[in-house]
Amino acid sequence: MKIRNLIATLALTFVTVFAFSQNADDKRVMKDAEKAISKLKKSDIGLEKFFSNSTGYVVFPNVGEGALVVGAASGNGVLYENGTPVGMADMKKLDVGIQAGGESYMQVVFFETEDALNEFKEETLEFSAEAKAVIVDKGASKKANYNDGVVVFVKSKAGAMADASIGGLVFSYSEF
C-alpha cells in the first residue's frame, strides 16, 4: 500500500511540475512575442497595416538557425486572431545545400484569409524552397504582398548565414 501511495504521489508531482514548467515557457514566449511585435513595428511602420488588417498572424520571437551543408531552424511562437493570442505554435525547418553559419531572428507570418489561417491551424501549411520572406527594414513592407494568402517577414537579431539551399518549413499549433 505504501509503494502504491508513493508511486501516486510521484506521478502527481511529475504532472504538476511538467504542467507548471510548460505554462512558464508559454508565458515567456508570449512576453517575447509582444516585444517582437513592438520591435517589428518600429523597424518598419508599414507593418502596422498587416497587423491591423490580417485575419491572423503568428509571431516567432526567437528562431535559431544553424547550417553546414545541412541546416535546421526551430522556434516557438504565438498565434493571434484579431490581435488576441489564441494559441501556441512551433516551427521546424530543414534544408540542404550550399550553406554555412548561424543566426537568430524573429519571424511573423500573416494570414490574409480565414482559409489561410485555418490551413495553419490544421497543420497543413508548409513552405517549400520557393517561399520568400521579406527582410524587415524601413519601407520594405510597402512592396510586400500576400502569396496564396500568406506573407512572411523576418528580422535578424544576430549572426550571419550564407545560404543557397532547398528544403521545407513545417508548423504545428495548439490552442490554449
Image: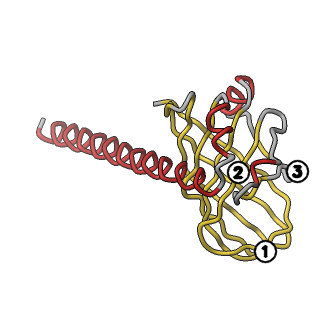
Tell me the residue that label 3 is attached to.
130
Q: Which of labels 2 and 1 is toward the front? A: 2
Picture layout, residue 124 above or below residue 91: above
SS for callout 1: strand
Q: Residue 153: which numbered mark, if any?
A: 2
Rendered residue at 76%/54% (across/down): 140
Q: Mark 2 or mark 3, which has the lower sequence index?
A: 3
Give the x, y percent position of residue 45.
64, 49
SS for callout 3: loop
C-alpha gap between disc 2 and disc 3: 15 Å
- Residue situated furthest top in the rendering: 114
Q: Observer-nearest residue: 93 or 78?
A: 78
Q: Residues within 10 Å of mark 2 (few under 14, many from 20)?
A: many
Give the x, y percent position of residue 152.
73, 47
Q: Which of labels 2 and 3 is toward the front? A: 2
Q: Quadrant of residue 166?
A: bottom right
Drawn side of residue 88 relative to residue 152, left or right: left
Picture layout, residue 91 above or below residue 125: below
C-alpha gap between disc 2 and disc 1: 19 Å
Tell me the residue that label 1 is attached to.
162
Kind of residue at disc 1: Ala
